Image (cartoon, rainbow, N blue to C red):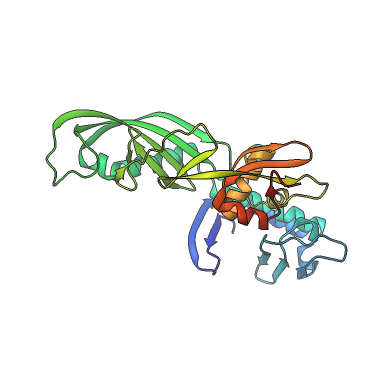
């Protein structure tokens, strides 16, 4: 970052560049941040902080590097693993300020989300072929971070059908449509027309039958859900540690089931359903195919003593 912009760059596990997010930054906010580095004596801090004797060893949280460069100084401080208890108080305050800036760089305002959605719709095959009279009907924001914007649009096509129908025989008739768009991190993540057409994949939406029992339809096949448990203790849970390190931000503090769902979904790609804290154990349901990995992460089958 500098006095005019905050830039946040993402990369994959091998360090390959993926995407850059940039937001404007003003001179006053930049000076306040530099003052924080000076007040907390960043240049006098150690170059590396690691677990000390008696501190818990945290895994799977990555490494933190904070660098400050000017015409005179270049200083990098590393925290490995990235865990707040390994940092001096001043470094914790600097890290918190930078986490807030990262959240700002990733944020999408309501106006930005609408601009992104409308530009996408106008260039998508269905609307681009013969659509007109695009109108925003509703816009809701899910209070997680990065925000998820859910936008409902209405428009009219001059012919029936979906997608680019250039080489198709179509019926000329004014056809009203509704489109549900999800925008997150400045990208359209999903787009469904009339609840039946996937505008991103350009194919009919695959509808899953409703199930009243503990099964879930996965790619056309039913997969059993297994009930598992995790012991409640005085030690910090892995999802609490993950949340404290700023790996996910919520606009308002999440409850425990929301945090558990976000942690296992984001870090391991595991869906956890029906989470309950009964004082002795956290219980939840997972797909049978995920149960072995959950056992490796400290969960056990519910019926086990």
User: Within the image, what quadrant is residue 162 found in?
Assistant: top left
Residue 98: x percent and y percent? 66, 54
The quadrant of the image that shows the N terminus is: bottom right
Residue at image location 59% in from the left, 46% down from the top? 286
In screen coordinates, is 105 left or right of 221? right
Between residue 57 and residue 212, name the one nearer to us.
Answer: 212
Residue 170: x percent and y percent? 14, 37
Residue 85 can be seen, yes or no: yes
Between residue 144 and residue 108, name the one nearer to us.
Answer: 144
Residue 254 can be seen, yes or no: no
Single out the residue that lies furthest toward the right.
54
In screen coordinates, is 77 left or right of 171? right
Residue at image location 65% in from the left, 68% down from the top? 70
User: Within the image, what quadrant is residue 177 found in?
Assistant: top left
Residue 80: x percent and y percent? 72, 66
In screen coordinates, is 251 left or right of 87? left
Quick check: 114 above or below 83?
above
Residue at image location 22% in from the left, 29% down from the top? 175
């Amino acid at each position: 970052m500098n006095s005019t912009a905050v830039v946040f760059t993402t990369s994959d596990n091998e360090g390959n560049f993926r995407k850059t997010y940039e937001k404007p930054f003003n001179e006053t906010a930049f000076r306040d941040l530099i003052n924080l580095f000076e007040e907390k004596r960043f240049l006098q801090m150690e170059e590396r902080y690691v677990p000390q004797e008696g501190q818990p060893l945290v895994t799977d949280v990555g490494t933190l590097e904070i660098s400050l460069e000017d015409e005179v100084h270049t200083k990098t401080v590393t925290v490995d693993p990235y865990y707040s208890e390994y940092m001096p108080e001043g470094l914790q305050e600097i890290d918190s300020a930078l986490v807030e800036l990262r959240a700002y760089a990733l944020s999408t305002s309501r106006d930005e989300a609408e601009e992104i959605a409308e530009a996408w719709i106008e260039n998508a095959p269905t609307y681009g072929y013969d659509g007109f009279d695009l109108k925003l009907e509703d816009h809701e924001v899910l209070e997680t971070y990065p925000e998820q914007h859910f936008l409902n649009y209405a428009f009219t096509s001059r012919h029936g059908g979906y997608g680019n129908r250039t080489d198709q025989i179509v019926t000329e008739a004014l056809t009203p449509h509704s489109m549900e768009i999800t925008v997150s991190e400045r990208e359209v993540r999903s787009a469904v027309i009339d609840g039946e057409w996937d505008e991103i994949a350009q194919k009919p939406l695959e509808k899953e039958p409703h199930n009243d029992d503990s099964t879930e339809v996965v790619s056309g096949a039913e997969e059993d859900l297994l009930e598992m448990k995790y012991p409640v203790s005085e030690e910090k849970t892995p999802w609490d540690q993950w949340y404290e390190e700023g790996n996910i931000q919520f606009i308002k503090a999440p409850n425990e089931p929301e945090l558990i769902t976000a942690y296992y979904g984001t870090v391991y790609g595991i869906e956890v359903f029906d989470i309950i804290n009964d004082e002795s154990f956290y219980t939840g349901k997972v797909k049978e195919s995920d149960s072995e990995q959950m056992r490796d992460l400290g969960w056990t089958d519910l019926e086990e003593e």
